[in-house]
Amino acid sequence: MAENTQMQLVTFQLGEEIYGVNIMDVKEIVKVCQVRPIPNAPYYVEGIFNLRSEIIPVINLHKRFQIKKLEKLEDEEFEGGFIILNIDNNKFGIIIDKIARVVAINLDDIKAPPQMLSGIGTEYIQGVIRQDDSYLIVLDIRKIFNAKELQKIISKN
């Protein structure tokens, strides 16, 4: 197989949908920690937390895209946490409802997103991949948080 025809995604659940981000942008996955609010932060910034002496801002994609949180069933193990992303040497966490798994996908399988998809603007979606009876939504994490926005959030710390 030729080079660069596959990509690995870290997949996770936000509300009812499964999303994926390029594994190359993921630093690590951590369980929910104590998050301290930041005064005057944008509405979707949950706050900051300390990860091994490094201050990490936490972004709430539920608020950013008006996604309803996943309802936890009583017998279900809740596996929420943060995915720590590293974009252009800026680290930040995104809150997830449930971690899924790492999947390898063929770039040819990524299709253009439908016009309306769970409140997330199509400009933030790299594409969708059909999986059995559902879709995996591939996020373009670099477009969700532009450099200027990231700098503003990170400089508040």
Image (spheres, grey):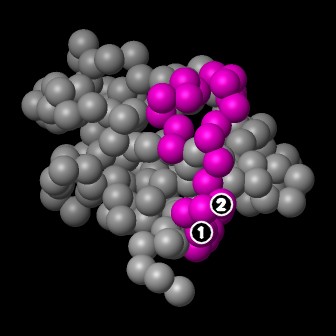
The residues tagged by marks 2 and 1 sit, at their Cα atoms, a distance apart of 5 Å
Q: Position of residue 66 (x, y in %)?
A: 60, 20
Residue at position x 53%, y 38% in the image:
125
Residue at position x 60%, y 62% in the image:
108
Q: Which residue is under mark 1?
A: 106
- State the residue in front, 1 or 101: 1
Q: Residues within 10 Å of mark 1 (few under 14, many from 20)?
A: few
Q: Amino acid at mark 1?
A: Asn
Q: Which residue is under mark 2?
A: 109
Residue extending furthest toward the left: 155
**32, above or below 132, in the image:** above
Q: Position of residue 37 (x, y in %)?
A: 32, 27
What segment is highlighted magenta in the picture?
98-126
**122, above or below 125, in the image:** above
Q: Is residue 123 magenta?
A: yes
Q: Quadrant of residue 103?
A: bottom right
Q: Quadrant of residue 107?
A: bottom right
